[in-house]
Image (spheres, rainbow, N blue to C red):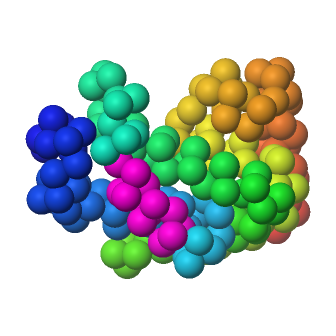
Amino acid sequence: MDLAALRRGDAAAIAECYRRHAGGLLTMLHRFIGSREDAEDIVHDVFVELPRAMAQYQEHGRFDAWLARVAVRRAIDQQRRRKWFAPLSAVFERSDDGQSIDRDVIALDRAGNALAKLSPSLRQVVVLRIMLDLTHPEIAKWLGISVQASEVRLHRAIKQLRQQLEHLR
């Protein structure tokens, strides 16, 4: 991928980047915010703003991981503006390409239902920590909470998820 062309706003480079990454971003954002329409809007906005965002890209680590973080930041900003956080019942659903995230569909369905029952503040931390593999300091910065609050929320979420899933056995 031609990063210099992306920085210049070259339409062909942006189109190629879109072809490579938009589907994955859409799936991830849909799971994160629970609304396909909002996820589509955010993916569109990410690629419209990509040349400007590229100024922040340091070329350390994987480009697709950086792009996913840009998209999640955009989603969090949008949700802060709207003051809502949609249920994340779709977190463990099948991806758009029809492939299951895991082979045990029943377990995934139960996990998705359990995740949807968590409070929004707990779900946020679970999704950011597990799906995006963010550290607690990164989560704290993104959500505007302390590192300790992020750790506590993850601990509480895991405890609640275990209780809900244990209850289903």
Q: Residue at x 35, y 31 (%)?
A: 55
Q: Locate residue 71, reporting x and y percent.
A: 49, 50
Region in magenta: 39-50
Q: Residue at x 46, y 60 (%)?
A: 45
Q: Quadrant of the C terminus?
A: bottom right
Residue 103 visible in the shown view: no
Q: Residue at x 40, y 40 (%)?
A: 53
Task: State how many labels appear.
Answer: 0
- Magenta region, main secondary structure: helix
Q: Nearer the viewer, residue 97 or 44?
A: 44
Residue 125 visible in the shown view: yes
Q: Residue at x 48, y 72 (%)?
A: 40
Q: Locate residue 159, reporting x and y percent.
A: 85, 43
Q: Locate residue 99, reporting x and y percent.
A: 37, 72
Q: Quadrant of residue 146?
A: top right
Q: Quadrant of the N terminus?
A: top left
Q: Quadrant of residue 155?
A: top right
In this rendering, would 28 be left or right of 138? left
Q: Nearer the viewer, residue 116 or 160?
A: 116
Q: Locate residue 107, reporting x and y percent.
A: 63, 67
Query: Is residue 125 one of those drawn in magenta?
Result: no
Q: Quadrant of residue 85?
A: bottom right
* Looking at the image, residue 90 lies above or below residue 135: below
In this rendering, would 143 be left or right of 16? right
In this rendering, would 114 be left or right of 160? left
Q: Nearer the viewer, residue 2 or 157?
A: 2
Query: Is residue 45 one of those drawn in magenta?
Result: yes
